[in-house]
Image (tube, grey):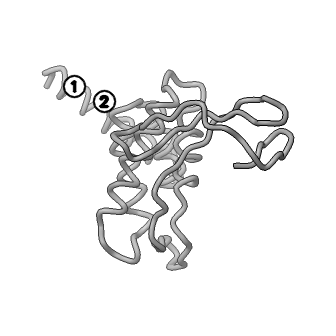
Amino acid sequence: MRCPFCHFPETDVIDTRKLYEGEVIRRRRKCRACSRRFTTYERIESVSLMVVKKDGTREPYDREKIARGVRTACYRRPVSADAIEQLVNDVEAMVMATDEQEISSQAIGDAVMRRLRDLDEVAYIRFASVYRAFTDIGKLREAVDELLEREGDRNGRP
């Protein structure tokens, strides 16, 4: 592994840990030249899965695109990086379990929204406002009302 700081081609692995039930391996490394430390992550490369977007176009599945959307929705919210990573892992596991060559962006977005709703309601509304492309305040209000009803059901209120 090449050092990201000095680009020396040889590094030593200092520590290795399994994360997310063995789905990811985290390695702490140290450069042999500059002695700086850095972290790398290993995960199984997904098969060539295509995402079918709303307009019918297709693009390769990109885990990082999901992670960016979730991080943006969770910006300045009390949601840990580990919780975000776990959410993305859960969505990716759902995507990979389909055994299909293609999956709709709607299925991915719905899976993200279900998990965000349980994680952080403000992040859920932020994500939903972009994903569902709210065109007026009425649509946003419907989403908020849905959350309030759900909250009332959880607390045993009518």
Q: Is residue 147 above or below residue 132?
A: above
Q: Which mark is residue 152?
A: 1
Give the residue displayed 48% in from the left and 26% down from the top: 79
Q: Is residue 129 above or below residue 37?
A: below
Label 2–label 1 contact, CB within 8 A = yes
Give the residue displayed 47% in from the left and 36% down from the top: 84
Q: Nearer the viewer, residue 100 or 72?
A: 100
Name the amino acid type tagged 1.
Gly
Q: Nearer the viewer, residue 69 or 129?
A: 69
Name the amino acid type tagged 2.
Leu
- Is 80 situated left or right of 30 in this image? left
| Cα distance between the residues tagged 2 and 1 | 6 Å
Q: Secondary structure at mark 1?
A: helix
Quadrant location, the C terminus: top left
- Is 80 situated left or right of 86 in this image? right
Q: Which mark is residue 148?
A: 2
Q: Which mark is residue 88?
A: none
Q: Nearer the viewer, residue 50 or 48?
A: 48
Q: Is residue 14 above or below residue 20?
A: above
Q: How many marks?
A: 2
- Which quarter of the figure has residue 138? top left
- Is 128 situated left or right of 68 in this image? left
Q: Nearer the viewer, residue 116 or 29?
A: 29
Give the residue displayed 36% in from the left and 61% down from the top: 95
